[in-house]
Image: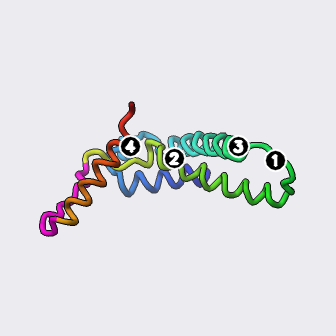
Amino acid sequence: MNRYGQMALDHNRRHRPAAYSQIPDPEAFFAAAGEEIAAEVTRLRDEILGPMRPGENPEAYRLRSYQALATAEELTLADHHLFQPDPSIDTQEDWGDDPDLDRRYRTLAEINQAINTPL
């Protein structure tokens, strides 16, 4: 199992125990999921990185490759269904004792929802 599979297994075991318990063979499932995640990270890294730029030396290209990899990992893992929160757990917080803070968090939640709503 690669590191992405292990990350997904650990996350699901800790944060999605009900879903995790429904997987008949977690080792095989997360090993396969890790391979899929690795392939997506590589594909996205290559897309972000692109070819060497005119005048770019190999060292600069290598450093840019590391940055592209970090970005690809962040984007892929943030969007992957195995790393999403358990929908059965209510994550709403009540800031009613501080109306200003409550208003700010509600505004941020509305903005976040608007950003994530497909057009």
User: Label 4 sits on what residue type?
Assistant: Ile
Secondary element type, mark 1:
loop
Q: How far apart are marks 4 and 3 (CA)?
A: 26 Å
Residue at which label 3 appears:
46
Residue at which label 2 appears:
27
Q: Considering only order in the chain, which callout, 2 or 4, is on the residue closer to the N terminus?
A: 2
- Give the foreground label among 1 and 2: 1
Main secondary-structure element of the magenta-colored stretch: loop
Q: Considering only order in the chain, which callout, 1 or 4, is on the residue closer to the N terminus?
A: 1
Where are the magenta residues, as a range? 89-99
- Give the foreground label among 2 and 3: 3
Against 106, residue 115 (above or below) is above
Residue at which label 4 appears:
115
Residue 77 in the image, given as x and y percentages of width and height: 51, 49
Residue at the (83%, 60%) spot, across then down: 59
Residue at the (18%, 64%) spot, across then down: 95
Tag 4–tag 1 contact (CB < 8 Å): no
Residue at which label 1 appears:
52
Q: Distance between the residues labelled 2 and 3?
A: 29 Å
